[in-house]
Amino acid sequence: EYFAQLEAVYHNSTIDVPLTYNDPGEGRNFINGMVRSQLPLDSYPQGFDCSHPDAWNGVTTNYHTYHEQANPAQAWYFPEFQGGSFDAWGPTASGTYV
């Protein structure tokens, strides 16, 4: 309901931009037809951890299948795909020995 209200505010204004929603982790969020927006994917297949550079996950192979099930009528893109990672800092950070 909140997203639909937000969408209405933009459509009733002078702003002319497409609406997108960054669906984290293939969560099928906002795909119930209530909101007409692009449904791109947010994916970090290698996790969000720089502390273990030797640990690599396998290749994710279900992205196309997910798109076909979740939102096949619209364009498909990845605005946030393994966009980086970081390690925490400070005395309790990984690799810090006290």
Image (tube, grey):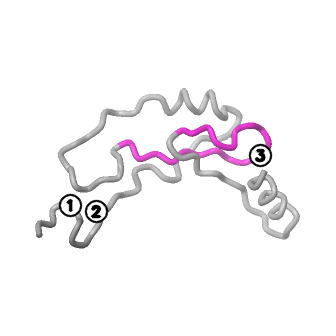
Query: Which of disc 2 and disc 1 is earlier in sequence?
Result: 2
Residues at marks 1 and 3 touching, judged by CB atoms closer than 8 Å: no
Disc ID at residue 36:
3
Query: Which of disc 3 and disc 2 is earlier in sequence?
Result: 3
* Vertical placement of residue 94 versus 90, above or below: above
Residues at marks 2 and 3 touching, judged by CB atoms closer than 8 Å: no
Based on the picture, tell me whether residue 31 belongs to the magenta stretch.
yes
* Vertical placement of residue 23 versus 86, above or below: above
* Secondary structure type for disc 3: loop
Query: Which of disc 3 and disc 1 is earlier in sequence?
Result: 3
Disc ID at residue 87:
2
Question: Which class describes the residues within 10 Å of circle 1: few (<14), some (14-19), or many (20+)?
Answer: few
Q: Position of residue 15 (x, y in %)?
A: 79, 68
Question: Which class describes the residues within 10 Å of circle 2: few (<14), some (14-19), or many (20+)?
Answer: few
Q: Which residue is mark 1?
A: 94
Question: Which class describes the residues within 10 Å of circle 3: few (<14), some (14-19), or many (20+)?
Answer: some
How far apart are the two marked residues, 1 and 2, measured between alpha carbons? 7 Å
View extreme (front): residue: 98
**How many marks are shown on the rendered structure?**
3
Based on the picture, tell me whether residue 32 belongs to the magenta stretch.
yes
Q: Position of residue 61 (x, y in %)?
A: 42, 29
Q: Residue at x 79, y 42 (%)?
A: 34
Residues at marks 1 and 2 touching, judged by CB atoms closer than 8 Å: yes
Kind of residue at badge 2: Asp
Q: Residue 8 is drawn in which quadrant?
A: bottom right
Q: Which residues are magenta?
A: 26-45
Kind of residue at badge 1: Ser
How far apart are the two marked residues, 2 and 3, measured between alpha carbons? 37 Å
Quarter of the image where the C terminus is located = bottom left
View extreme (bottom): residue: 90
